[in-house]
Every structure is written in structure tokens, then in C-alpha cells.
Amino acid sequence: MARSISHGECVLIIAFHRMSTHRVAPSRDLRHFLGRMCFSDQLAAYHGLIEQGLDKHLPASTTRPARMHEAMRYAIEGGGKRLRPMLLLATAELFGADGDSALPAAVAIECVHTYSLVHDDLPCMDNDDLRRGRATTHKAFDEATALLTGDALLTHAFALLATAYAAQPALAHSLIQELAATAGSQHLIGGQMEDLLAEKNSNATTDDLEFIHLNKTAAMIETSLVLGGLVGGADETHCATLRTVGRHLGLTFQIIDDILDATADTETLGKTAGKDAAIDKTTYVKLHGIDKAQQIAAQHTQSAIDSLQSLSGDTTFLVALTNAMTKRAN
Ligand code: IPE
Ligand code: IPE
Ligand code: MG
Ligand code: MG
Ligand code: MG
């Protein structure tokens, strides 16, 4: 069922549209520059920096085998919201790092996220034809190429971390350890496994659902913040707070994803609407209904903001981004 778009959502759509068209040159220290900008301009600035980082840190599409590298770039360049790299960069800056030093880690997390989408869309998983407003990688290329593209993006993320942070071995080790744990069988992949097991399972419980959402989605959002903190030199106490923020924001993010799947239209989403009900996924909408799911999302958003505001430093952008992700239209 389509619903009308609120004014707040219009502002967000415009902001995200501007992010995909606006290019901002990377700056050695974005903090002072960004501090004077309004939220949508800050989004555009981060987005420009991330697009340039992706272009710089992925192999050229002409690299042999060209089909492989074209597919990697096709999957990445599809125009995602870039939430995870944005959280990473903003958190790194909160702890005093400059945008350039955090950029390889931001590219790495977007590579892992995009790999997870390429595989998530495969016929043996969610069987989706549309992603980020265009044909899924297996539709634009073929299934085997999409499988290999996901493998390549995942592997590239770790190669990039090992190379880009080689001069700071302790940091490289922490970044790789954090991302590997999150991408692994007990988090992202484990969440995806239980997501498939819970399909058409009328015995799936709210605890099962929380495990799925915490692991398939919230873990990567948590890690985006933690990687940013690590690049910025955050201590263990601060990293623990960042984990709390990420867990709540991640739960909100996936609950909203479930709600949008049931309420938004395919064009706005850039992916097939109504898919969860069609394949009988266990979601917040299925187990709680839309109103209750919205209430739970709002509680997690507030908890994320409360934890963010317990950090010292200027968290205005991160709070606004958290609110924006709650009100997002796609
Ligand atoms: C989609 O993530 C998969 C989920 C975890 C819900 P996003 O909604 O962040 O997708 P992109 O990166 O903007 O395409
Ligand atoms: C996907 O969840 C989560 C991951 C890709 C890890 P969904 O299957 O709900 O994501 P969409 O709706 O296809 O983007
Ligand atoms: Mg899925
Ligand atoms: Mg899916
Ligand atoms: Mg979904």
C-alpha cells in the first residue's frame, strides 16, 4: 500500500538526491568546514568524500578480468545512502581524526555492506531484481558473476585495511579484528542464516527476530561507529558507548526497513516493495504490526540519541543523522 510522503521525508529525499549529485573535494580536516554547514550540506559533503574514496580505493573497471571489476563497481556505484561510511567518518572526526585518515576504513565498510546486498539479492537468498534503483548485480551480469563480486568486495575490504593502515600496525589489527568479527558467522552471516531459517516459520519468536536484526543489520552499524572511534583513538569506554549507540540505531534502521517494505512504493525504495510479505519473512511488521513496530523503533532511536549525547564533543551531526534515518523514505 503506497502512502503519502511527509514534508520531513521530502527534505530527506532532496538531501539524499543532492548527495548523489553533489561532489565535494576531500579536505584535510573537514571538522571546521562541516561545523558551519546545515545538515543537508553536511550529508552532501560526506557523500562526496565517500564517492571519491570508493572511486580511489576500488580497482579500475579495466583491471583484468574486466567483467569482475565492472561488476564490483556496478554494485558499489548504485547510489546507496552510504550510512555506514558516513557514521564511520563522522565518529572518527568526533574523536579528532581527519576525513582522509578514516576514508579507507569507510570504503572498507561500504565494500562489506555492498557484498552483503549482492548476496542478499541472489535467487537462493531473497531473490530480488532491483537494488539501489537498478537491476541487481546478478540480473545485470549473471549469478556466478554476482557471487564472485560479493566474494571480491568482501576480500577487498580486508586487503584495503591491511594496506592503508600498514604504518599503524596496532590500528590495522584492531580494525581488521573488529570488521572480521562483525562480518562473520556469529553476526552478519549468522543473522542472514537465521533470517532464512525464519522464513515461513510461524514458530519464530520475538527473540529470534531480535537476534536476526541485531546480527544481520545492527552489528554492521555498531561496527561503523566503532571503526570510526578506533581511527580517532577512542578508548574502550568510548567504544562501549559507540556500540550501544550503534546497536540501537541498527535496530531502528532494520525495523524501519521492515516498515518501508510494507508501506513504501518500489520507485521510492529503489528495491522491490512488499517483498517480505510475499516470501513470508519474519519481520517487525509481521510479528508486531506497523504501529507497534514504529513505537519500538522510536524507543531505540531515543536510546541511540541519549547514548550519543553522553559523549563529549559535538554530536549534532550524528544526532541529526540518527533522526534522519528514523524518518527516511528509502
Ligand atoms: C539495506 O541497507 C540492507 C539493510 C540492512 C536494511 P541500506 O538501506 O543501507 O542500503 P543502501 O546502502 O542505502 O542501498
Ligand atoms: C538485509 O536485510 C540485511 C543484509 C543485507 C545483511 P533485508 O533483506 O531486509 O534487506 P533489503 O530489504 O533486501 O535491502
Ligand atoms: Mg534479506
Ligand atoms: Mg533482502
Ligand atoms: Mg528489507
Image: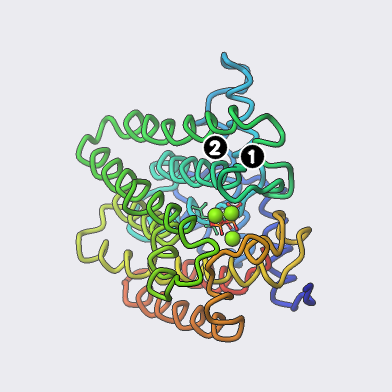
Report the residue marked by disc 1. 77
Nearest the camera: 277 or 24?
277
Q: CA distance from mark 2 to mark 1?
A: 8 Å
Q: Nearer the viewer, residue 178 or 97?
A: 178
Under mark 2, the amino acid is Leu
Left or right of 140? Residue 257 is left
Disc number placed over residue 287 in the picture, else none = none
Residue sitting at 34 percent across and 46 percent down? 184
Q: Which mark is residue 54?
A: 2
Q: Is residue 59 above or below residue 170?
A: above
Q: How is the image coloured?
A: rainbow
User: Does 202 sit left or right of 126 as displayed?
Assistant: left
Q: Secondary structure at mark 2?
A: helix
On-image quarter of the N terminus:
bottom right
Look at the numbered discs 2 and 1 and tell me whether their residues touch, using CB distance below 8 Å. yes
Which residue is more in the foreground, 326 or 219? 219
**Circle 1 sits in a helix, a strand or a loop, which is it?**
loop
Q: Quadrant of residue 70?
A: top right
Q: Which image quadrant for residue 55?
A: top right
- Image: 43 above or below 48: below
Q: Earlier in the sequence, mark 2 or mark 1?
A: 2
Locate residue 84, reporting x and y percent: 48, 54
At x 71%, y 46%, the residue is 129
Count neighbours of disc 2 (C-alpha within 10 A) and say few if under 14, some if 14 to 19, many if 20 or more: many
In this view, the residue farthest toward the top is: 64
22 sits left or right of 182 in the view: right
Q: Is residue 295 above or below residue 152?
A: below
Q: Quadrant of residue 239?
A: bottom left
Q: Amino acid at mark 1?
A: Glu
Q: Position of residue 113 (x, y in %)?
A: 49, 47
Q: Position of residue 230 (x, y in %)?
A: 29, 51
